[in-house]
Amino acid sequence: MAHSDWEAVIGLEIHVQLATSSKIFSAASAGFGERPNTSVDPVTLGMPGVLPVLNREVVELAMRLGLALGCTIDQSSRFARKHYFYPDLPKGYQISQFAAPICQGGEVRCVVDGEVLSFRLNRIHLEEDAGKNVHDQRNDRSLVDFNRAGVPLVEIVSEPDLRSAAHAVAYMKAVHQVVVALGVSDGNMERGNFRCDANVSVRRRGAKAYGTRTEVKNVNSFRFIGRAVTYEIDRQIGLIEAGGEVTQETRGWDDEAGITRSQRSKEEAYDYRYFPDPDLLPVVIDDAWLASVRATLPELPLDRWRRFQDELGLSAYDADVLTQSVERANYFEQVAKGAGDAKLASNWVTGELMAQLNRDGVALGDSPVAADALTELLGLVTAGTISAKMAKTCFQAMYHKGVSAKDWVAANGGQITDPAVIAEHVDTVIAANPGQVVQYLGGKEKLLGFFVGQVMKATRGKANPGQVNTVVRERLAAQKGDS
Ligand code: ADP
Ligand code: MG
């Protein structure tokens, strides 16, 4: 099939669990991993006569996200009831937002192939999560755990602006990075705190109208979304080119089989009978509240990525690695400022430090070498007190033994830069290796490294390597003149 004749159209719906300690409409815990049906209360269970009370923190987190993404915040949004029957839904309806969501419009910016692209958002709305059915196959029964029911979510709905699997992956990563950077969610995908549904359709290139879409449910990893969207695009093109038609339906991604499977067709789609929830007042946000939330917004990861390149002269790649988490970017910036050399700081953080932490499976927050300790080490490098090579040895001592860079230098001595001392070592090495001198003078210039290595060995790595190199060359050249 000629893919160039076709264009994919993709819109993503991402559910993000908000980082609150209690639920959206009650004081029950929103924590994870508690015993089934212990984080529940009458509101969670939908007991008759109980009333929901909106958690203020939930509204604040949604505002924070909306403001950061350039959405219009509705200062009087409303909750609605979305009706459907399922055992994990105790009330028989989910409280969500429908006609008046808290955030409208806005955009998600992300980098695709080095280029910054912007994808429009349709809306971000608040809703409660449902419980969870647990299928106990051994005893041939299903159990329901309501711990998750009433946990606060935002649903982030994009416009159908994405045009490829690469767009979908980049968009999902960008949203994840933003919600985590803002502290809106922990973004933990294994726990289901960040879940994505992908709407996919295809149309002939140049066509104005959208094709019929399918919705692929629960593509909950960056790898899955790439694979699922690619598969679905190929499937739809294949289907149409073979004379068939795409059916509007819900599909599921089976990663093991590498395919999507039909789950529910449009004919079986629910009529949710949405209507405004009479138990909840409109969510009124006054200007002062809006302004106070706006005032606490941090720099977004993408802006930081740009600034690291424009102001600090880092490569796009290094800036990307460093802005993967707020913690990492903060660590780097502290070191870069303190050491007065951003490139050096970047090399050390993305190189030596991250390699060591990855080897040991240690998080940056638990690094035995804190930012101020690394700053001190790099200060000694830029001052010429120790060479880059010595700094690596020193770093190992700092990391494994907890010594400071200054103490290490006091105990081991700094770099030897005195020309007279270096010359003495070079002369000793040359005198001790007459055979190699003859070979070198006979044209085996590779032996230069041997002489430099011997001097470094004799000085236990402390001689300034650049100086040693120069002096070895000079002294050997002088030997040539002599012979
Ligand atoms: P619903 O709420 O019924 O799922 P929406 O119109 O709210 O429908 O759209 C849900 C998502 O589907 C949005 O992210 C939107 O961008 C996307 N979408 C809508 N039409 C298409 C289409 N033809 N192809 C791909 N995605 C689409
Ligand atoms: Mg949908």
Image (cartoon, rainbow, N blue to C red):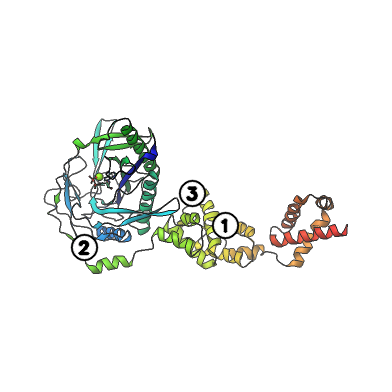
Disc 3 and disc 2 in contact, CB within 8 angstroms:
no
Does mark 2's beta carbon lie closer than 8 Å to ligand 1? no
Does mark 1's beta carbon lie closer than 8 Å to ligand 1? no
Q: SS of the residue at dot 1?
A: helix
- Picture coordinates of residue 242, whole percent (x, y): 32, 30
Q: SS of the residue at dot 2?
A: loop
Disc 1 or 2, which lies upstream in sequence? 2
Residue shown at 75% from the left, 52% from the top: 450
- Residue of label 3: 361
Query: Viewer-nearest of labels 1 and 2?
Result: 2
Q: Quadrant of the C terminus?
A: bottom right
Q: Quadrant of the N terminus?
A: top left
- Residue of label 2: 75
- Residue of label 1: 401
Residue 406 sits in quarter: bottom right
Q: Mark 2: few, some, or many residues within 10 Å (few <14, many ≥20)?
A: some
- Picture coordinates of residue 37, whole percent (x, y): 24, 45
Residue shown at 42% from the left, 58% from the top: 326
Disc 3 or 2, which lies upstream in sequence? 2
Give, as a three-letter code, the residue at label 1. Lys
Of residues 295 and 406, the one drawn nearer to the viewer in this rendering: 295
Residue shown at 87% from the left, 59% from the top: 482
Give, as a three-letter code, the residue at label 2. Gln
Q: Is residue 288 visible?
A: yes
Real-space Cα separation, disc 1 to disc 2, in angstroms: 55 Å
Residue shown at 54% from the left, 67% from the top: 340
